[in-house]
Image (cartoon, coloured by chain):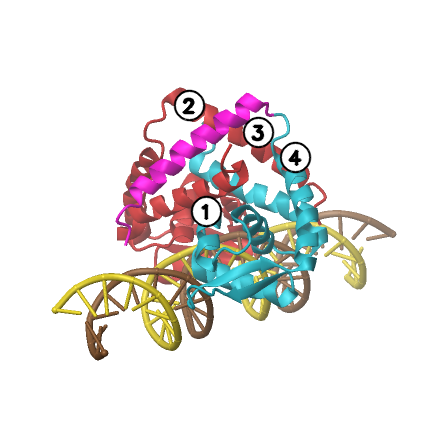
Chain colours: A cyan, B red, C yellow, D brown
DNA sequence: AGCATATAATTAGCGTGCTAATCAAATAGC
DNA sequence: GCTATTTGATTAGCACGCTAATTATATGCT
């Protein structure tokens, strides 16, 4: 095996992000921006920032910066939660919803480009193998601090 | 498929880096630091900074910052190349070589931890699938600028 | 020889991940 | 009911990927 799996994994993830980025480029959003938009749609509008960060798999302060930019750009708005004054819920604005629709199209085109040549069975195999490696990573990180 | 392959890929790569980081932690080097040390050993001492960056798969300015830290820490030294005054070649210092030996041990322990439960055939399968996805990424990035 | 182009190292500055620390509100325990 | 702890959002600052631009040297073309 010429290249180590760790390196390969890292580079493939990096390449994937860059390809999606190219497909998204015309929409004028950065990587963290489209990630947040797509995941907010998946999580469902009205979730808290903490919940969205967890869904994306990043930490709250990381999302904070991205959210500020999206709010600034007018795609998302924060609202105070009536039940819990600490929470702020997230909602698409009308321009945000329009942009989202275009993003979904681009996202699936990018996905298809990356997986070109892999049949359904191979995609599932890759998914299964990566899931097992990721589980190992999580096990090893118990008691990290 | 619950989680998208893109997300899974990204998180697995991230998890892998963090696990290796934990194994390396006691050695007092950052992620980019041990990457540079291990790859310099693989490339062979005396290579240029550009060559090492290419071997690692990062850009020259990214390596530059890391190299400055490693030189500062006394693990690596830069030397002027006699044939080409633009080039600088990279060499381990004595403390650097000692550290490297420990790093190699930790690196393979980390690798084994991440791949626990995957037999040889599965590892090769994962390698092959990732390689194909990475190829797609490269194809899509032709003419990127 | 002399000027244009190419290449290696470097500097400057951005994007996005993180942890640590702070503030405000909610919850728990006495 | 009041203080102690927990929780969500936020701020500050670090690590490490990038591109663009600068500098010094090498190479190539006329």
Which is in the foreground here, disc 4 or disc 3? Answer: 4
Give whichever of discs 3 and 2 has the lower sequence position.
Answer: 2
- The residue lying at 46 percent from left, 28 percent from top is B126
Which is in the foreground here, disc 2 or disc 1? Answer: 2
- The residue lying at 42 percent from left, 52 percent from top is B32
Disc 1 element: loop
Q: Is residue C29 above or below residue A98?
A: below
- Crowding at label 4, few (<14), some or many (≥20) Cα neighbours within 10 Å? some
Which is in the foreground here, disc 4 or disc 2? Answer: 4
In the image, the segment drawn in magenta is A118-145
Principal secondary structure, stretch drawn in magenta: helix
Say whether residue A145 is visible.
yes
- List x then y, in percent, for residue A43: 52, 48
Q: CA distance from mark 1 to mark 4?
A: 39 Å
Q: Are marks 4 and 2 in contact (CB under 8 Å)?
A: no
> Which one is in front, A14 or B34?
A14
- List x then y, in percent, for residue C13: 59, 69
Question: Residue under circle 1?
Answer: B46
Q: Are marks 3 and 2 in contact (CB under 8 Å)?
A: no
- Crowding at label 3, few (<14), some or many (≥20) Cα neighbours within 10 Å? some
Subunit of mark 1?
Answer: B
Question: Residue under circle 4?
Answer: A113
Question: Residue under circle 2?
Answer: B122
Subunit of mark 2?
Answer: B
In this rendering, position of residue A43 left or right of residue B74:
right
Q: Which mark is residue B132?
A: 3
């Amino acid at each position: 095996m010429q290249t180590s799996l760790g390196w390969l994994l890292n580079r493939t993830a990096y390449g994937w992000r860059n390809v999606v980025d190219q497909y998204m480029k015309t929409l004028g959003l950065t990587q963290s921006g489209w990630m947040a938009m797509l995941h907010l749609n998946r999580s469902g509008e009205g979730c808290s920032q903490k919940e969205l960060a967890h869904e994306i798999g990043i930490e709250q302060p990381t999302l904070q910066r991205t959210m500020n930019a999206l709010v600034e750009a007018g795609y998302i708005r924060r609202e105070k939660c009536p039940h819990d004054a600490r929470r702020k819920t997230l909602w698409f604005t009308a321009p945000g919803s329009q942009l989202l629709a275009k993003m979904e199209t681009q996202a699936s085109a990018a996905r298809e480009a990356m997986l070109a040549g892999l049949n359904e069975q191979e995609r599932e195999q890759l998914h299964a193998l990566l899931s097992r490696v990721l589980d190992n990573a999580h096990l090893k990180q118990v008691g990290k601090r």
